[in-house]
Structure formats: structure tokens, C-alpha cells
């Protein structure tokens, strides 16, 4: 079953609440995650919410990495969408799981672009 | 079952191939989709690929709208992730389905951030 892309949806619970509200930390981690999985970063957009929470995206040549955080719940939603065989999204997932300090995570993988052959 | 966010994953096949390669068209449609569903746009990042294809994101106060296109296959992957009860992601989905001219689409909804109460 060939697909154009792999989309990992990470549910990260019981994270370190401080890092979930630290835009610069999350920005560096997302860029590092893009690098770790072999992707090429093209652009980014990050936003700090008041009183808390961060949203951020790193656009990559192979699709994107995205994070939304709710520090008040210790929760982050992360998406890692990659296309092509040279990129390893699991590597990005591993780094994010480690850096956000979650002790309760799950990953759903959705294959995107399953076309008729 | 309460969740922090609703994440719609749209698989849009047999789209109008010309619009899938038109960055400015897609940018306007994504911004309009954000508006239609009641969201507040915060930022955007769009990229034109060579020889074809567009990736783009509109960050909203309520999460994000994202598109990746493969004009050569007439295919687009769209994500509409919203949090809060005031935003209606279905409205954004309806607009994108209409504007991209797909005659073969599917929508998966994933609830994000289902926390222990």
C-alpha cells in the first residue's frame, strides 16, 4: 500500500509544564527534530499565547512539523508529516518525546495520499 | 468524551490540478476557510515547489489549517485543527472541498487532547 506521505500524530501527556510554555525552547526542539529526521527546513511560524501556551510550525521540503501546547494540562499535540523515503519521522518523534519530558504518550500514524495505481 | 481539539484530516483526490499549483489561490482559500469557520488568523507560511506543488499553513488562535498539494496526482492533503467550541471546522472543510474541485474526498476526524478528568 503506497502512500505519498506518513503523518504521525503524537499525544503527549504529563509533559514538563515549563518547557510547554517556552517558545524558544520549543522552536529549537522542532528545528532540531526536523534535522534529526533528515528533513530540510523551509520556514517557521511560532506564537506565544496569553496567559500560556505555544503554537508552532516548521515547514519542511518534505511537509511539516507542528506543535500546540497546553501547559496548564501538561499536554502537547504534535504532528510530524513527511513524504519521501529518505526522511525518518520516528527520529523526530523520539526527540520530541524525550525533550518534552512526557511520561504518557501515544502515536497514531495515518498514511496520506493513498492513490489508485 | 471531552477533547481539547478537533483535527480533521481531508484526503482530496481528483482535484483541479491547476489550482493545486497556484500558491496565491491556495493562500486566499486557506485564509477564507479560517474566516468561514470563525477562526482568528495569526500568521502564515506558504512555499511553491519546483517543478510543482505547494505547501502552506495558516496559524490560527484556535490551532491551524494546513495544505500540501501534489498537482501531478490531482491530490491534496488538508488538515484543519481547531480548539474551542466557537469554531466550526466543517465550514472550512466545505469551502476547501468546493474550491479545490475534488470529486473524491474523505475526512477523518481525530479528537486531540482527551485528558483524564
Image (cartoon, coloured by chain):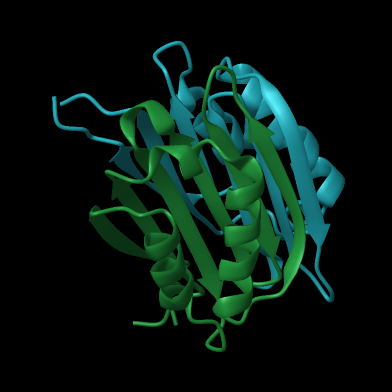
Chain colours: A cyan, B green
Residue in front for this viewpoint, B96 or B58: B96
Q: Is residue B101 above or below residue B31?
A: above
Residue at 42% over, 53% down:
B100
Q: Quadrant of residue B23?
A: top right
Can you see residue B115?
A: yes
Residue at 68% over, 45% down:
A57
Tell me if A97 is positioned left or right of B104 in this view.
right
Q: Is residue B90 above or below residue B102?
A: below
Task: Please state the total of marks drawn on the protein image.
Answer: 0
> Residue B113 in the image: x percent, y percent?
47, 67
Q: Quadrant of residue A27?
A: top right
> Residue B43 in the image: x percent, y percent?
77, 57
Q: Quadrant of residue A107?
A: top left
Q: Quadrant of the C terminus of chain B?
A: bottom left
Tell me if A37 is positioned left or right of B24 in this view.
left
Residue at 47% over, 29% down:
A82
Residue in front for this viewpoint, A38 or A112: A112
Residue at 48% over, 81% down:
B88
Tell me if B44 is positioned left or right of B89 in this view.
right
> Residue B82 in the image: x percent, y percent?
54, 70
> Residue A29 in the image: x percent, y percent?
72, 34
Can you see residue A101?
A: no
Farthest residue, direction bottom = B86
Q: Quadrant of the N terminus of chain B?
A: bottom left
Amino acid at each position: 500500500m503506497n502512500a505519498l506521505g506518513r503523518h504521525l500524530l503524537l499525544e503527549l501527556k504529563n509533559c514538563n509544564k515549563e518547557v510547554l510554555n517556552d517558545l524558544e525552547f520549543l522552536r529549537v526542539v522542532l528545528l532540531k527534530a526536523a534535522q534529526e529526521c533528515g528533513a530540510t527546513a523551509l520556514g517557521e511560524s511560532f506564537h506565544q499565547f496569553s496567559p500560556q501556551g505555544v503554537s508552532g510550525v516548521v515547514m519542511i521540503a518534505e511537509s511539516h512539523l507542528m506543535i500546540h501546547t497546553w501547559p496548564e494540562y501538561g499536554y502537547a499535540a504534535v504532528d510530524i508529516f513527511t513524504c519521501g523515503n529518505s526522511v525518518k519521522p520516528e527520529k523526530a518523534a523520539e526527540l520530541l518525546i524525550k525533550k518534552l519530558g512526557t511520561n504518557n504518550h501515544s502515536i497514531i500514524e495515518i498514511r496520506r495520499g493513498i492513490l489508485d495505481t
